[in-house]
Image (cartoon, coloured by chain):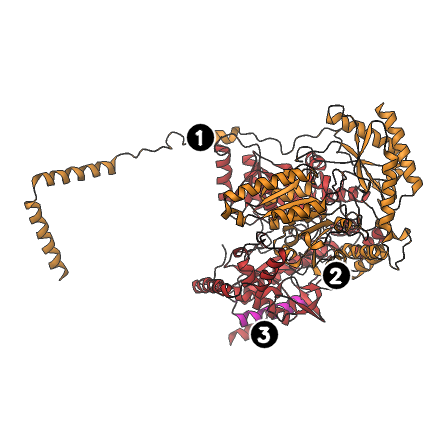
Amino acid sequence: MRPEPGGCCCRRTVRANGCVANGEVRNGYVRSSAAAAAAAAAGQDFVSLYQDFENFYTRNLYMRIRDNWNRPICSVPGARVDIMERQSHDYNWSFKYTGNIIKGVINMGSYNYLGFARNTGSCQEAAAKVLEEYGAGVCSTRQEIGNLDKHEELEELVARFLGVEAAMAYGMGFATNSMNIPALVGKGCLILSDELNHASLVLGARLSGATIRIFKHNNMQSLEKLLKDAIVYGQPRTRRPWKKILILVEGIYSMEGSIVRLPEVIALKKKYKAYLYLDEAHSIGALGPTGRGVVEYFGLDPEDVDVMMGTFTKSFGASGGYIGGKKELIDYLRTHSHSAVYATSLSPPVVEQIITSMKCIMGQDGTSLGKECVQQLAENTRYFRRRLKEMGFIIYGNEDSPVVPLMLYMPAKIGAFGREMLKRNIGVVVVGFPATPIIESRARFCLSAAHTKEILDTALKEIDEVGDLLQLKYSRHRLVPLLDRPFDETTYEETED
Amino acid sequence: MATATEQWVLVEMVQALYEAPAYHLILEGILILWIIRLLFSKTYKLQERSDLTVKEKEELIEEWQPEPLVPPVPKDHPALNYNIVSGPPSHKTVVNGKECINFASFNFLGLLDNPRVKYNSCTSIKAAALASLKKYGVGTCGPRGFYGTFDVHLDLEDRLAKFMKTEEAIIYSYGFATIASAIPAYSKRGDIVFVDRAACFAIQKGLQASRSDIKLFKHNDMADLERLLKEQEIEDQKNPRKARVTRRFIVVEGLYMNTGTICPLPELVKLKYKYKARIFLEESLSFGVLGEHGRGVTEHYGINIDDIDLISANMENALASIGGFCCGRSFVIDHQRLSGQGYCFSASLPPLLAAAAIEALNIMEENPGIFAVLKEKCGQIHKALQGISGLKVVGESLSPAFHLQLEESTGSREQDVRLLQEIVDQCMNRSIALTQARYLEKEEKCLPPPSIRVVVTVEQTEEELERAASTIKEVAQAVLL
């Protein structure tokens, strides 16, 4: 059950959004001069490239608080980061760089779960060596002459890491979904996709040509009903039986912080003979006692998941994506995946970074660094979430998920929260419509094993202050702060007063 | 007071009942009885016939058998076993254990393995990438919107915009995703796109994602395109209101990957202004190849770059890096920062690859002579490969990536593929690394015939080019006759 704010907060949020509609009146006076000039330059009689109402929201709401996004950085995105300061003299329509650099900003926005975003250490040295030897690019596709020995090594390692028969790696995580789902399903198949799935899964499902049905977020009754109806009634109108049913879910949902109910999904999939496609973009490396992802977190068998997909961007400090599964699946993808035929393969230093970081997590490099990172992340997650709940904020998501959305609700608070936190030297990510429902704007913290307790405490102190300043402590359930000190006579005496 | 009025009304009613005519009372009585009957009778359910019982549903669920997730792949599938390249895929490369000269990687300017070739610049690409690696690490750990924008990215965008002489440029972290995200950002359902039949797969996927009306015109045939545009104009005149909100786009490639031919850009620009359709130009093969300074097909023809609405290219060919970019006017490009799916929802390009691309641009700017050298070598090998019995050269003489197709097909595509693979394997045995052009046979809209892809780079010496030509001639004669 999600905590809900008081009713008057909801009403105020809706009213605040309604005020934005006033912008429509303003628009009548301020038909942007930029648009007029561009229309003249584009040539008369051309149909205008953009519809006015399409970017209404962009011009009126997004533009005013645009300085909270696309903040350029100039250092490694570790626990602390250097942000380039920018200023705007025309209400965020354009930015100028002042030349100052805000140093040592606490980074609560980068996806650096296990802390492998580093510019020193064994991973960086190995990547540098491979860069010297192989160069940066590849200039060919996997099926032509772009398949390096490094790629074969990587895929073997990924298969061992996940506990599956075989794996295949791709150059971009987004493209892994959008290019492989169409290879697996087509017309006459059914895709059951979670309400809050990522844009790459939605695009892949659309490009495949299969029928898509959406079930409520993490709601097993909704999924079961769809499965039952699909098998009993078949395809719409013709009533032919479906060729295949594919269920698309994610390990951790990046905007909610919730973890998929994997045991129940697998039970349903077995009962109804559907196939399961699990996107572990955020959960690989971040969940489970040895960082093997959501399958290990629930103690399940990786063979139960038909297609295990994930990315190397978040927990391995590199880029790219992978798919793991049975050998037949991978053989099929090697021959039929759009990416293997038309897209360039992974760059060699990136491959080396993945290999080194994966070996580190598995403990194969001879150190216990990997294990420590996984444990540190789990501790940081529990500590951070507990303290935020004690302070009285509304936090979404599962207790163990390192993605922590803090609810803001009001559209004005999106900009205020982002700016206030930056003033206090903390970089956060704030999200509003259309990434989230219009009344559920939030700030999203991504915890990292690189965050020490001091960093977290500093951040929490500032969040507390800003929370009081902006009145963000909506929670009506106050957690009693845990006593960190052992129970002795002095404690007893204090509570007597 | 209320009860008094109520009683008074009741008395009035009873009196009315006595005074009413008989037929009126009978009619009302019948109506009331009819209503009561309707209320209590069984409703006529249409679903009654097709509603299944729980038991029947369970049986259906038991009986249903899905197809296997993937069909089995035969062990001898031509694309199953990849060539394994040990070490860098540079000019002299080791493929499947054999040392070969590379005629298959799109490394046109030889920038993949830069320090070996002596150019005038002080730093090399590898050194620049190494410096970036030491400063930023490998990954960016976030999309551009969430602390994934590095100063290197902003630098690269700036440099590309200056190099191409446009207002702004935007970079993507994957070459395929560049044009595949750019097209759906502008063209939506109801818009019309005129695209060449030989367009590459990335363009086809972008068009599919956009859900617009696609009209294919014959490859490089401007008369056919004009015919389609005229037909559309007639349609527009029938429905001017709809025409006022329907956007029109023409999508072409500078140098076509599938045929090695160049697009007739001056005629296209004329058609653009005549029929008010915007041009999207895909320059993956022609960027860094055509034109006096390598600016692509616009420079080659001397066309003002502002006439083209969007130029998209990937940095994986001439620039020997990873990723892609789009450039054009700010008014057009800025839109992709919020609507380009591959830009907003994906992690940004690793900084070391961006630094490598910047250094490659530096080299291109400092050594404009390499483009003439490349052109000459292309011409040389084109001439040398003419007249091979059984194989014909498909592609123009200034295209560095062209095809060798069978002069006469055997009739079955599989057989053709096998013959060409035999030629490729034998060439590999004689130290010339070639590859077949790979396609997804079931997914392509207009599947090109099977062919061998030959790629020319500046690093190949004249003697190597001659050797390659003679090797291919000999092998083709042996295999095909």
Q: What residue is shown at x 73% (from left), y 31% (from top)?
A: B449
User: Label 2 is found on which chain of the structure?
Assistant: B
Identify the image quadrant of the N terminus of chain B.
bottom left
Q: Nearer the viewer, residue A277 or B27?
A: B27
Q: What residue is shown at x 66% (from left), y 38% (from top)?
A: B223
Residue hosting label 2 = B155
Q: Colour of chain A?
A: red
Judge from the rendering whether residue A17 lies leftward or rightward of residue B451; answer left or right: left
Residue B96 screen position, x and y as percent: 85, 37
Could you classify mark 3 by the number of other residues whose Cα lies within 10 Å: few (under 14), some (14-19), or many (20 or more)? few
Judge from the rendering whether residue A257 lies leftward or rightward of residue B20; answer left or right: right
Residue hosting label 3 = A490
For the residues marked 1 and 2, what is the alpha-carbon distance in whole angstroms?
67 Å
Q: Colour of chain B?
A: orange
User: Label 3 is found on which chain of the structure?
Assistant: A
Residue contact between numbered discs 2 and 3, judged by CB atoms under 8 Å: no
Q: Is residue B167 above or below residue B380?
A: below
Residue B337 screen position, x and y as percent: 64, 56
Residue A298 visible? The answer is no
Residue hosting label 1 = B55
Identify the image quadrant of the C terminus of chain B.
top right
Q: Quadrant of residue A268?
A: top right
- What kind of residue is marked 2? Asp
- What kind of residue is marked 1? Lys
Judge from the rendering whether residue B424 lies leftward or rightward of residue A427; answer left or right: right
User: Label 1 is found on which chain of the structure?
Assistant: B
Q: Which residues are magenta?
A: A449-475
Residue A58 screen position, x and y as percent: 56, 60
